[in-house]
Image (cartoon, rainbow, N blue to C red):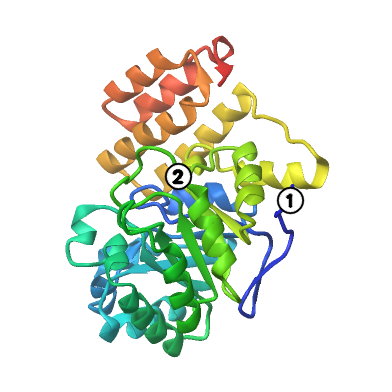
């Protein structure tokens, strides 16, 4: 596979490969990361945390950053638009043992952008540079940044922000091919990633957006010539996707997961959830995660409906274990 690398450097850190797993708010939690870690990603992230909450030592925020030794290499992503606390926030991520710290300038959610954070920072690109500079000056671990192509189609500025981030000392910039206004609708325009890569001198450019399988991973590497890729929604219910990409590179092919394998990994994910959560939170997580995996199966509609009606985690476990799985086919 063109573009795939078995070793990949960011600053003075060397990673196992250049297929990374994104910070996904409400999704890439501790059980998700346990599932992902067994397939040896190049780098994975905890969920995004807010700078303000970090510096006031909010316990719930610190809980989002739980990880174990087997999850390395792992990154922490921070969100905020205040240069005065950016350095302290980055230092907390470093002190917690993370391998990299990432600045989120891509989240499109209103409650994040309303104060100019997330993708709201695309409206003030020089401020992105100020925040990155504070982070770089505060830590020894590599500083990364994640952006969208622009706020809207009339203000595409990925290439401009790439140059600013490079000058500020960031070692990489991840570019999602959609604008903030698009959110997750329409298609990611990989041309914006390609143009940013062409404008970069030393900074590594990471491609993101609409990478749902091995074929789209191949396509984005080929189209953009990006240095690495970041898997987001395509990794939900497919923690093995990075491993499939590696197999295609090493062996020229990969084996699609069977129904039995999908069931096995779904139950394994449940086990991690039940070890980490209890009560209603475990129930809600199991409902959500079931939908991810069962989307990979043709004929699972009725099972999904039953799971969504379940009142407790053990009921969901029983539904999965007693269902006639041979009736299903891989999607």
Q: Secondary structure at mark 2?
A: loop
Which circle marks residue 2 in the picture?
1
Determine contact: label 1, label 2, CB under 8 Å: no
Is 121 positioned to the left or the right of 242 in the image? left
Percent of width and height locating residue 172: 53, 70
- Residue 322 x/y as whole percent: 48, 16
Q: Quadrant of residue 59?
A: bottom left
Q: Quadrant of the C terminus?
A: top right
Q: Going 45% across and 43% down the picture, which residue do you hit?
A: 233
Could you give the CA–CA distance between mark 1 and mark 2, rounded to whole angstroms?
A: 20 Å
Asked whether the viewer can see residue 169, the reply is: no
The residue indicated by pointer 2 is: 188
Between 208 and 198, the one lying in front of the other is: 198
Q: Quadrant of residue 300?
A: top left
Q: How many marks?
A: 2
Q: Compared with residue 177, is residue 306 higher up or lower down, i.e. above or below?
A: above
Q: Secondary structure at mark 1?
A: loop
């Amino acid at each position: 596979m063109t573009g795939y690398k078995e070793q990949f450097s960011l600053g003075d850190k060397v990673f196992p490969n250049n297929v990374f797993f994104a910070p996904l708010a409400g999704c890439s939690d501790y059980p998700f990361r346990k599932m992902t870690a067994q397939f040896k990603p190049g780098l994975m992230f905890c969920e995004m945390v807010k700078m303000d909450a970090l510096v006031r030592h909010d316990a719930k925020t610190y809980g989002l950053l739980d990880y174990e030794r087997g999850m390395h290499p792992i990154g922490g992503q921070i969100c905020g638009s205040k240069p005065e606390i950016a350095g302290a926030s980055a230092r907390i991520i470093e002190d917690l043992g993370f391998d990299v710290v990432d600045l989120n300038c891509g989240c499109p959610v209103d409650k994040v952008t309303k104060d100019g954070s997330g993708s709201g920072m695309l409206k003030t690109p020089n401020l992105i540079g100020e925040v990155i500079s504070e982070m770089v000056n505060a830590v020894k671990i590599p500083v990364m940044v994640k952006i969208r192509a622009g706020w809207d189609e009339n203000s595409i500025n990925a290439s401009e922000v790439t140059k600013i981030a490079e000058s500020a000392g960031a070692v990489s910039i991840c570019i999602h091919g959609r604008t903030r206004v698009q959110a997750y609708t329409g298609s990611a325009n990989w041309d914006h990633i390609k143009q940013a890569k062409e404008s970069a001198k030393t900074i590594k450019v990471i491609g993101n957006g609409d990478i749902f399988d091995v074929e789209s991973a191949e396509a984005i590497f080929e189209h953009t010539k990006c240095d690495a890729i970041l898997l987001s929604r395509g990794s939900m219910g497919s923690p093995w996707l990075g491993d499939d990409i590696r197999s295609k590179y090493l062996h020229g092919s990969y084996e699609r997961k069977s129904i039995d394998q999908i069931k096995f990994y779904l139950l394994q994910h449940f086990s991690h959830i039940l070890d980490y959560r209890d009560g209603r939170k475990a129930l809600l997580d199991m409902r959500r995660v079931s939908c991810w995996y069962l989307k990979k199966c043709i004929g699972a509609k009725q099972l999904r409906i039953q799971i969504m009606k379940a009142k407790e985690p053990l009921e969901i476990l029983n539904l999965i274990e007693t269902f006639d799985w041979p009736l299903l086919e891989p999607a």
